[in-house]
Image (cartoon, rainbow, N blue to C red):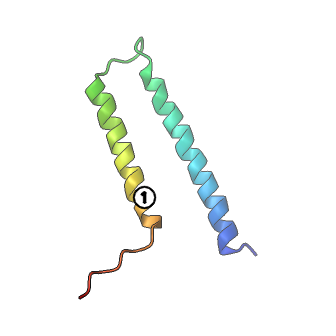
């Protein structure tokens, strides 16, 4: 029987590798002979990815305590 830790490691590793592969595939779009894009387009892509990464990372952080006097 698989423990919760083992299941986390298995699933997180698989999903992380899938994300890395997708990021590498986005890099293929940098080929100027096949695609036309602006710096603004590129910045929008990476801002969106970075924001989503930040949002997801926050989920792993301990919850903030609410303010109390």
Mark 1: which secondary structure?
helix
Q: Residues within 10 Å of mark 1 (few under 14, many from 20)?
A: few
In-front residue for pair 67/45? 67
The residue furthest bottom is 69
Residue drawn at 37 percent across, 57 percent down: 55
- Please provide percent x and percent y for residue 67: 26, 81
Residue drawn at 59 percent across, 58 percent down: 12
Answer with the quarter of the image where residue 54 lies.
bottom left
In-front residue for pair 62/7? 62
Q: Is residue 27 above or below residue 51?
A: above
Quadrant where the N terminus sits is bottom right
Answer with the quarter of the image where residue 8 lies.
bottom right
From the viewer's perspective, tell me whether residue 23 is left or right of residue 35. right
The residue furthest right is 1
From the viewer's perspective, tell me whether residue 48 is left or right of residue 61. left
The residue furthest front is 69
- Please provide percent x and percent y for residue 17: 60, 46
Residue drawn at 53 percent across, 33 percent down: 24
From the viewer's perspective, tell me whether residue 43 is left or right of residue 10. left
Residue at mark 1: 56
Answer with the quarter of the image where residue 61 lies.
bottom left
Quadrant where the C terminus sits is bottom left
């Amino acid at each position: 029987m698989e423990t919760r830790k083992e299941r986390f490691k298995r699933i997180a590793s698989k999903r992380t590798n899938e994300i890395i592969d997708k990021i590498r595939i986005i890099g293929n779009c940098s080929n100027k002979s096949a695609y036309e894009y602006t710096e603004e387009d590129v910045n929008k892509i990476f801002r969106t990815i970075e924001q989503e990464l930040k949002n997801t990372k926050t989920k792993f952080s301990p919850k903030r305590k609410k303010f109390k006097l």
